[in-house]
Amino acid sequence: MHNATLCADLGYYYRDNDATQGAQQVLAALDTHDAQASSYRVRQRALIGRFSPNDPQLVAAYSALLDDLMRRPIR
């Protein structure tokens, strides 16, 4: 259960600090997770790959940010 907007497609997401929605996600997970655990794991691993240091797009984006930072004058 989480409310991290940057990865709302991962895990069991609820908006903001909506405790009612969070509780509903807990109940949904309790009711359905075991029946779909294998497909859930495959789907989540594919989605979380975008945060992996093995993801070339992620590495390129961070490299570009660091390069830009290093080119800026020291204050």
Image (tube, rainbow, N blue to C red):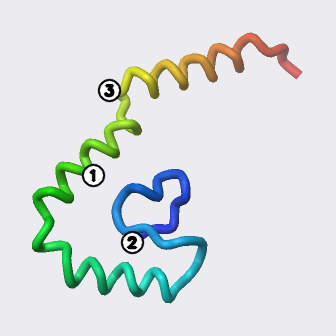
Give yes or no for contact between labels 3 and 2 (Cβ–Cβ under 8 Å): no
Look at the picture and state if 34 lies above or below 6. below
Q: Say which quadrant the C terminus sits in.
A: top right
Q: Nearer the viewer, mark 3 or mark 1?
A: 1
Q: According to the image, label 3 marks what residue?
A: 54
Q: Residues within 10 Å of mark 3 (few under 14, many from 20)?
A: few
Q: Residue at x 26, y 42 (%)?
A: 46
C-alpha distance separating marks 3 and 1: 16 Å
Q: Is residue 32 left or right of residue 47?
A: left
Q: Where residue 44 is drawn, which disc sits there?
A: 1
Identify the secondary structure beneath mark 1: helix
Q: Earlier in the sequence, mark 1 or mark 2?
A: 2
Task: Give amino acid for label 2.
Answer: Met
How far across and how far down the image is residue 56, in percent? 39, 21
Q: Nearer the viewer, mark 1 or mark 2?
A: 1
Q: Residues within 10 Å of mark 2 (few under 14, many from 20)?
A: some
C-alpha distance separating marks 3 and 2: 26 Å
Q: Residue at x 60, y 72 (%)?
A: 16
Identify the secondary structure beneath mark 3: loop
Task: Give amino acid for label 3.
Answer: Asn
How far across and how far down the image is residue 59, in percent? 45, 23
How far across and how far down the image is residue 17, in percent? 59, 77
Q: Where residue 25 is drawn, which disc sits there?
A: none
Q: Say which quadrant the N terminus sits in.
A: bottom left
Quarter holding residue 35: bottom left
Quarter holding residue 24: bottom left
Q: According to the image, label 2 marks what residue?
A: 1
C-alpha distance separating marks 1 and 2: 13 Å
Identify the secondary structure beneath mark 2: loop
Q: Residue furthest top?
A: 71
